[in-house]
């Protein structure tokens, strides 16, 4: 009986100690300059969140995502080159790259890629 009581007291002590340590570690510092500085995107974190958003920045971000996903799709295609028929594999890659190049030309013609107008 004494061992059970002692082990319960030890568990309670360790639990309380861990909670106090977490509370001390997680206390916010008023002098933290990094948290008070603006975010990487340039918006002030303490200002209104309803500020107008630059459409140009959004379009460049979407363009980056498209070409980033392109890499994710093309890399497995390179690995499967040995397992598939050469003609089908080549045609798939060529069609995929042509679609991407046509999309890039379309964005270029609509001056999405130009920052200063």
Image (spheres, rainbow, N blue to C red):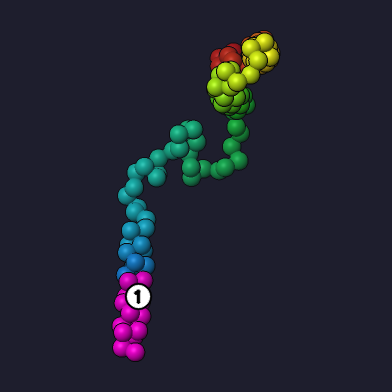
| Total number of numbered discs in the rendering | 1
Q: Residue at x 65, y 15 (%)?
A: 85
Q: Which residue is drawn at 32% across and 71% down?
A: 14
Q: Nearer the viewer, residue 74 or 37?
A: 74
Please state if 20 lies on the left or on the right of 99 as rendered. Answer: left
In magenta, the rendered stretch is: 1-15
| Residue 20 at x, y percent in the picture | 34, 68
| Residue 12 at x, y percent in the picture | 36, 76
Q: In which quarter of the image is the C terminus?
A: top right
SS assignment at label 1: helix
Please state if 45 lies on the left or on the right of 92 as rendered. Answer: left
Q: In which quarter of the image is residue 64?
A: top right
Residue 10 visible from this viewpoint: yes
Q: Per the image, is 61 magenta?
A: no
| Residue 88 at x, y percent in the picture | 68, 14
Q: In which quarter of the image is residue 84?
A: top right
Q: How crowded is mark 1: few (under 14 residues within 10 Å), some or many (20 or more)?
A: few
Q: Which of 86 and 45 is in front in this view?
A: 86
Q: Which residue is drawn at 36% across and 71% down?
A: 15
Q: Quadrant of the N terminus?
A: bottom left
Q: Is the magenta stretch mostly helix, strand or loop?
A: helix
Q: Is residue 91 above or below residue 74?
A: above
Q: Quadrant of residue 75?
A: top right
Q: Per the image, is 6 magenta?
A: yes
Task: Tell me the residue that label 1 is attached to.
Answer: 11
Q: Is residue 71 above or below residue 6?
A: above
Residue 56 visible from this viewpoint: no
* Residue most extreme to the bottom: 1
């Amino acid at each position: 009986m004494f061992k059970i009581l002692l082990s319960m007291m030890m568990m309670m002590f360790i639990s309380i100690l861990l909670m106090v340590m977490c509370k001390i570690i997680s206390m916010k510092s008023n002098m933290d300059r990094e948290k008070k500085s603006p975010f990487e995107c340039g918006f002030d974190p303490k200002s209104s969140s309803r500020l107008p958003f630059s459409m140009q920045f959004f379009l460049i971000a979407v363009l980056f995502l498209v070409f980033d996903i392109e890499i994710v799709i093309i890399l497995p295609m390179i690995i499967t080159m040995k397992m598939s028929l050469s003609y089908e594999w080549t045609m798939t890659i060529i069609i995929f790259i042509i679609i991407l190049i046509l999309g890039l030309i379309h964005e270029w013609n609509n001056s999405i890629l130009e920052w200063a107008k």
